[in-house]
Amino acid sequence: MEKRELVVIGAGPAGLTAAIYGRRAGLDVLVLERGIAGGQINTTEEIENWPGVQHATGPELSEMFRSHAEKFKTEFRDAQVSSVEVRDDVKVVVTDKGEIEAEAVILATGAYFRRLGCEGEAEHIGQGVSYCAVCDGAFFEDEEIAVVGGGNTAVEEGEYLTAFASKVYIIHRRDEFRADRAAVERALSNPKIVPVWNTVVEKIEGDGMVENLVLKNIKTGETSNLPVAGVFMFVGQLPHDEPVRGLVEAVKGGWIKTDESMETSVEGLFAAGDVRDKDLRQVVTAASDGAIAAMAASAYINEQVHLRSVLLEPDHVIALFYSSIEREQVALSDVVDGAARAAGKKVALVDGYRNARMVEKLKIPSLPAMVELNSGKTARIKPLTSVADVEEFLK
Ligand SMILES: Cc1cc2nc3c(=O)[nH]c(=O)nc-3n(C[C@H](O)[C@H](O)[C@H](O)COP(=O)(O)OP(=O)(O)OC[C@H]3O[C@@H](n4cnc5c(N)ncnc54)[C@H](O)[C@@H]3O)c2cc1C
């Protein structure tokens, strides 16, 4: 099977940033992408919040990201990833072009907005139809716009949009919002917000940009026109978590849980960008996640390679596992080192605090502990209570 150091799944802002950082850290990086590099931003004409670039179209920014990753000789492959599996502690990425074994994997598969599905929606995306208030709200200064939805996102984002728009119609198919009470009260007390109850959008019209919505009242069947310059759809956003569904911990809806270094509940498997459980899904936060994930993946790979060569591959090893944050244990490591030299033996010193997963893997009950391994298999473990225990172990 093909073997790689770092496999990045998805070439959006998170994946491409991970590739840049991974390559600059000296890793062998393979990026798998099923579509066009750049991800979601390819579908927008206006990006005004990527620092250093006052204005770019999405495809322009995508191209800059991709060519930046190419400059560092990132390898790209057109491939659809169906799953990531852990087989005997080895991570395997299963694609439509074969299987790849990876030291570390970064899942950067992004997310997508649910479409409303009405006539005129698809052709007006980026031309007045938007799914992201933070991205596009500022383009509607002093204009009348509409929001579709009735949950927390619709109500809160609708209120956010009143900072720009002169009026925000919130179109909802029911006669009350599903959002929590505080959000609803805040929105309804805002004079710029006009709820439109029991109503659905049948058609979005406009020559180029959005100009009008054809609405239908689902109680009376009556149709009407609502002239607006834009419409924001908040009918749901979902992660592309398919490759790791059931493998890693996730919150409701499938958003992947990570720690601060972007590691998921599976060691060596990181998640970055929109696919993650997070508050703000934007290019800048995706890029940040990608950078953090790549550096953490690099540290993980180095640690694994080092530990494998020191602990698991030799025929016979004696090691002291200690905690580098306990002063007494650091002092003990010096004593053990001295005692081993005096006895003419070699003892590998392993910081069990930084390598907690290895401690877990070897089932070491507490630190400090002496461990004897034969070809990676544990022969003896002795938690230490005194220096005499060390001498006894080394006999
Ligand atoms: C219309 C629109 C306008 C936006 N405007 C802005 C803006 O102005 N400013 C801003 O900061 N943000 C904006 N955003 C949000 C921004 O695009 C996202 O936050 C960002 O793209 C997330 O990056 P990502 O790398 O996490 O995921 P994505 O950009 O979604 O990239 C994920 C990539 O993974 C690939 N992929 C998914 N599953 C698989 C698989 N199984 N196998 C292989 N490849 C896979 C996808 O094809 C995709 O290329 C906008 C989003 C949209 C939709």
Image (cartoon, rainbow, N blue to C red):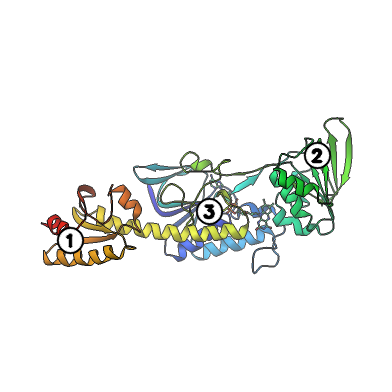
In the image, 283 versus 219, the foreground residue is 219
* Location of residue 49 (image quadrant): bottom right
Q: Secondary structure at mark 3?
A: loop
Establish whether ligand 1 lies closer than 8 Å to the Cβ of label 2. Answer: no
In the image, 372 versus 202, the foreground residue is 372
Q: Going by the picture, which residue comes out furthest to the bottom? A: 52
Q: Could you tell whether 267 is left or right of 327 in the image?
A: right
* Residue that carries the numbered disc 3 in the rendered image: 272
* Residue that carries the numbered disc 1 in the rendered image: 387
Q: Amino acid at mark 2?
A: Val
The local crowd at label 2, few if under 14, some if 14 to 19, many if 20 or more residues have their Cα within 10 Å, is: many
* The label number, if any, that marks residue 93 in the structure image: none
Q: Amino acid at mark 3?
A: Ala
Q: CA distance from mark 2 to mark 1?
A: 77 Å
Q: CA distance from mark 3 to mark 2?
A: 34 Å
Q: CA distance from mark 1 to mark 3?
A: 45 Å
In the image, 167 versus 71, the foreground residue is 167
Q: Amino acid at mark 1?
A: Val
**Residue at 40% across / 53% down in the picture?**
4
Q: Earlier in the sequence, mark 1 or mark 3?
A: 3
* The label number, if any, that marks residue 201 in the structure image: 2
**Residue at 56% across / 49% down in the picture?**
277
Q: Secondary structure at mark 1?
A: helix
